[in-house]
Amino acid sequence: MIVAAIIIVAAILIIGRIALRIPIAAEAKKRSDAPGNAEAYRVENLEKHPDSILTGKSILFLGSSVTYGAAAEGQSFVELFAYLDGVNAIKEAKSGTTLADKPSVSARIAFGNGDSYIKRLKAIDPGSKIDCVVCQLSTNDATMKLPLGEIGPGRELDAFDVKTITGAMEYIIRYCQNVWNCPVVFYTGSWYESAEYQAMVERLHELRDKWGIGLIDLYSDEKWNAISRQAYDLYMFDAIHPTKAGYLHWWMPKMEKELAQILAD
């Protein structure tokens, strides 16, 4: 019975992956052809930033599809920080995954890894040299309507309910402080209509007050979000995912400036 069950589960995973290949391939072609992913925006065609305060910093970028660059052929701001600013970038990003410590079956089938941010964070060698951790406020938690949870009463790892979004964020902050004793910075996506994500952003501001973390809040910056429709269509493939041009000309300048300020303090 056990062997039969294993065979059935394996068959489901195989069939699921095969069924997803065609739509995934078609979507990848659509993204590749987007104007914002033109050859001119490829990282190797850009000019490096001289005398960056970030040069030589070892930064862990933890996240999901936005950190990965899912709508930009895998080129996100992580590659820009590495190439333009000389950052030693560690990219731990898996599309479809969540902050809340919950496996994503769809991500497992489509991308081969559905582990939460926490599980993937804990798999990184604690002996790695890391000067800063930059963590994405994942839209997947909002889309899946996972529980927001409450701010924990204490500061130890066992004080947090990691099955909730808030508990997971607190766990990540405390874990990084314990293991690497380095600054932790959360960043949000640009504005899109989502009551769940807005609540997550508001909770993140509360966590900044509790923990003193860095926060790059793209979501709430009304002036920054007030770009023309033409620019938006070039910079964003959809409401959540930037193109190469979007990372380069819209997100990166703000993130680069704010991260440099945080690490300079």
Image (cartoon, grey):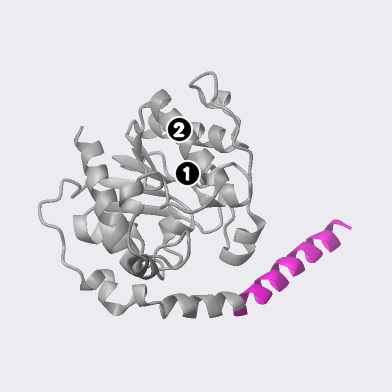
Q: Is residue 8 magenta?
A: yes
Image location (x, y in percent) of residue 130: 32, 41
214 relative to 24, above or below: above
Majority secondary structure of magenta residues: helix
* Quarter containing the N terminus: bottom right
- Mark 2 and mark 1 in contact? Answer it, CB < 8 Å: yes
User: Who comes first in sequence, dot 2 or dot 1?
Assistant: 1
Q: Which residue is mark 2?
A: 175
Tell me which amino acid carries mark 2. Tyr
Indicate whether 103 appears above or below 48: above
* Residue, far top: 153
From the top left corner, tell me how far across and down residue 75 is, in percent.
36, 65
Element on which disc 2 rests: helix
- As rendered, which of 33 and 90 lies closer to the eye? 33
Q: Is 245 contained in the magenta span?
A: no
Residue 48 in the image, given as x and y percentages of width and height: 16, 62
What span is in magenta? 1-22
Q: Amino acid at mark 1?
A: Leu
x 32%, y 78%: residue:
38
Vertically, is 211 above or below 214? above
Residue 62 visible, this angle: yes
Give the side of residue 257 with respect to residue 73, left or right.
Answer: left
Q: Which mark is residue 69?
A: none
Residue in view at x 34 percent, y 55 percent: 226
Q: Is residue 43 left or right of residue 219?
A: left
Which residue lies under the disc numbered 1? 121
Q: Is label 1 in a helix, a strand or a loop?
A: helix
Q: Is residue 121 above or below residue 225?
A: above
Q: Position of residue 30 (x, y in %)?
A: 48, 79
- Quadrant of the frame with the C terminus: top left
